[in-house]
């Protein structure tokens, strides 16, 4: 098993990026513990395909992670909010959704549907307008 694990660490990716071997990791001139350089070296020692490895299972380099700062929205009292960027606001979205709901009610009015006959149903059961039925045991939440 140990030889097999060593094979994973000795693979060199196709993109020409040199990975560290276990010998290089133990050298005296290694960067200080928990420094950026040391953490980068530790990432390079992970086997390809590991979730934290910078390499895919086939040895190719993974794309860089997205810059989360670009995805952040400003606070409402700050400049450059979504309303200024053209993305719209919740108020505008709510107005559009209310319009869609009105269209839905016009297309399928509640008055046009005949209510289901629930007179013979057992207590705690459920019957839908389309004939669906759950007895009391099936209707437990």
Image (cartoon, rainbow, N blue to C red):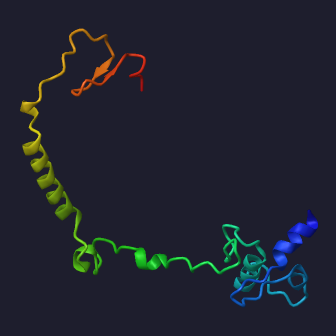
Compared to 134, does 22 lie above or below? below
* Whole-percent x, y for residue 16 in the image: 72, 91
Does residue 48 appear left or right of residue 25 in this picture?
left
Compared to 49, does 35 lie above or below? below
Foreground: 6 or 79? 6
Quarter holding the C terminus is top left
* Whole-percent x, y for residue 58 in the image: 70, 74
The quadrant where residue 35 appears: bottom right
* Whole-percent x, y for residue 22 in the image: 88, 79
Does residue 66 appear left or right of residue 73 in this picture?
right
The quadrant where residue 51 appears: bottom right
Quarter holding the N terminus is bottom right
| Residue at image coords 33%, 72% | 75
* Whole-percent x, y for residue 30 in the image: 84, 87
Foreground: 53 or 29? 53
The quadrant where residue 20 appears: bottom right
The tally of labels here is: 0
| Residue at image coords 12%, 25% | 114
Does residue 69 appear left or right of residue 25 in this picture?
left
Compared to 72, does 14 lie above or below? below
Foreground: 22 or 106? 106
Compared to 141, does 97 lie above or below? below
């Amino acid at each position: 098993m140990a030889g097999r694990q060593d094979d994973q660490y000795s693979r060199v990716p196709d993109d020409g990026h040199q990975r560290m071997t276990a010998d290089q990791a133990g050298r005296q001139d290694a960067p200080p513990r928990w420094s950026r350089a040391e953490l980068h070296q530790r990432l390079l020692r992970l086997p390809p395909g590991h979730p934290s490895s910078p390499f895919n299972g086939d040895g190719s380099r993974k794309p860089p992670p997205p810059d989360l700062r670009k995805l952040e929205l400003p606070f409402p009292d700050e400049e450059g909010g979504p309303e200024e960027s053209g993305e719209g606001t919740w108020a505008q979205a709510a107005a559009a959704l209310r319009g869609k709901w009105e269209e839905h009610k016009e297309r399928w009015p509640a008055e046009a549907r005949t209510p289901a006959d629930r007179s013979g149903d057992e207590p705690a059961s459920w019957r839908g307008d389309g004939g669906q039925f759950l007895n009391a045991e099936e209707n437990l939440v």
